[in-house]
Amino acid sequence: MSKKILFLTKYNRLGANSRYRSYQYIPYLKKEGIIIDTTPLFDEIYVKNIYSTKKHFLQDILRCYFKRLIILFSVKKYDLLLIEAELFPYIPGLFEWLLKVFHIPYLLDYDDAIFHHYDTSPMRKIILGSKIKNIAKKANAIVTGSPYLTAYMEKYNNNVFEIPTVIDLKKYPEKKSPLPEKFTIGWIGSPYTEDYMMEIYPVLKQFGKNHDYKLVLIGANESMRKRLKGINTEIWKWTEEDEVKDIREFNVGIMPLPDTKWTRGKCGLKLIQYMGCFLPVIATPVGINNEIIENKINGYLADTQTEWLDALNELYENKDLQIKMGTEGRKLVEEKYEIGNGASLLSVINKFL
């Protein structure tokens, strides 16, 4: 008899973390004869609202929580649950505890340091500070996307498996596209991460004094044009169908970050997507970025504004360097950050079916 798994994702396919940590594996698992059902916590209405306004609407949250609660009454029919992070954000882990009480096996998947959501204020820390470690202890296993997350989870669970966030290279062309006529600095993200671009705003202004270039932001709000005053900025709407084609319009992909507890847990998806498109990259040396980038081989680790400016200058002035670094980045993705046949997640799941 086929085994049945329920993926309790955080978002539908509009959410990058759910799309890359869960949904892209489903076809591979189905090929192995596993029956997969999926149910996101936050639906399309909610995701579109937060991406357009960056605000949470209480009625949307309550509607989504109620739907998930109803779903939980049917989980006994599944052989395994795969939960992205937690069942209900900002609510104590009562429902994860009930899964354990009723002997329903579940795996947790983390691609963000969400435990830091609960240590940002004294009140949150009192009420929810121990939530993630408690549900981690009860899980049958935990899958993580970065060494920072792995180190945290290994303190509370003996079955922790680190699976980096990967891409499906079948969706990426095998050859680099021609370099754009105008030097294009590119970034892909969402309204929730667009603030990180302000980390290098002075660099981008300085770079523009001596170079003709444009900045393309995929997935950011139109308001970023005003915030990046004085920079030739284009905002492109993100779609799953066009993201690879759009990234291929860049000369270089960037990932500026502040150095915080939250950003240290990130999984570097932007860098992997850029490299999959044969692009050189520049990123702040925070967390897993230090593992993905081999400095001055497939990109640059830029910690200061001077380092950012130097990296941009070198790439602008040397097209051969762009091609060489982009080729090195693509090789890394092929070796380490490609989904292949989905065997990494399948091997973990099979341990608990």
Image: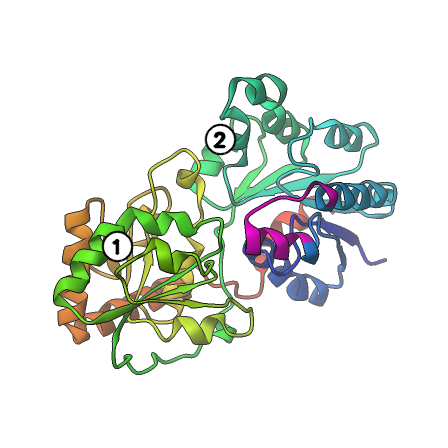
Residue shown at 38%/74% (left/top)?
248
* The N terminus: image quadrant: bottom right
Residue shown at 83%/46% (left/top)?
71
Horizontal and vertical percent position of residue 276: 40, 68
Q: Which residue is mark 2?
A: 152
Residue 51 among those drawn in magenta: yes
Q: Secondary structure at mark 1?
A: loop
In this rendering, the answer to whether 197 lies above or below 314 is: above
> Which segment is the magenta one?
46-59
In this rendering, the answer to whether 256 lies above or below 129 is: below
Closer to the camera in the image, 69 or 53: 53
Q: Earlier in the sequence, mark 1 or mark 2?
A: 2
Q: Which residue is mark 1?
A: 294
In this rendering, the answer to whether 340 lies above or below 112 is: below
Distance from Cα at disc 1 to Cα at disc 2:
25 Å
The residue carrying pointer 1 sits among few (fewer than 14), some (14 to 19) or many (20 or more) residues within 10 Å by Cα, namely some
Does the residue at mark 1 contact the one at mark 2 (Cβ under 8 Å)? Answer: no
